[in-house]
Image: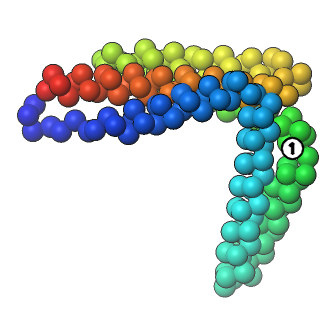
Amino acid sequence: MANHKVPSTSYLVLVGMILLVLGCVAVSSPAIAGKSVVIIIGVILVAAGVTQIVHGVGSKSWSSKALSLVLGAIAILAGLAVLAHPWLGLTVLTVIMAVYFVVEGVWKIIASFRFRPASGWLAVLASGVIGLLLGLLIWAQWPLSDLLAVGILVGIDLIGTGIALLTLAWTARGLRSAA
């Protein structure tokens, strides 16, 4: 047992605390958080589109060049549309978030059973159940949930994930001190 090194938990604690703080901020101002998420997605789409076009211009084959240019243009147009109409983007994002939370929740539930011997596995399981329930809640309330749902639910999910990471870090620290 002395030959095995237990990794540092400082990173888990740091990320857990950051997610916890960001989650509290998002829950306290959900409309701003939701609109911010949409704006960030719009900027990412524009940046991805520009990158795709640059890649397309540098491609040697015509088929690769055409595909990259078309996909880049579509991503830029989608990003600009989201930036021009963030509330409409928020409506679309609400549906995407519902699907995301359901998938993330199921993944965390499955992953929690891999941690089952450790005492922190229940926190990961709880985080997965929360994510799954949040996704189903968004879907059940759509389209009425557009304005506040994304900010509140992203905040709750960030808080749940932050708590799960902190719990895992404390469990790992306990294992390290026992070793």
Residue 99 visible in the displayed image: no
Q: 25 or 70: nearer the eye? A: 25
Looking at the figure, which quarter contains the N terminus? top left
Looking at the figure, which quarter contains the C terminus? top left
Specify whether 64 is left or right of 3: right
Q: Quadrant of residue 171?
A: top left
Three-letter code for the amino acid on which mark 1 is drawn: Pro
Q: What percent of the width, then of the height, locates residue 18? A: 51, 35
- The residue furthest left is 2
Specify whether 87 is left or right of 48: right
Q: Residue at x 85, y 28 (%)?
A: 147
Q: Residue at x 34, y 37 (%)?
A: 10
Residue 8 visible in the displayed image: yes
- The residue furthest bottom is 60
Q: Residue 72, relative to residue 20: is it above or below?
A: below
Q: How many marks?
A: 1
Classify mark 1: residues with Cα within 10 Å, few (<14), some (14-19) or many (20+).
many
Name the residue tied to disc 1: 86
Q: Residue at x 74, y 28 (%)?
A: 29
Q: What percent of the width, then of the height, locates residue 63? A: 74, 76
* SS for dot 1: helix
Q: 18 or 116: nearer the eye? A: 18
Q: Residue at x 86, y 35 (%)?
A: 91
Q: 137 or 56: nearer the eye? A: 137
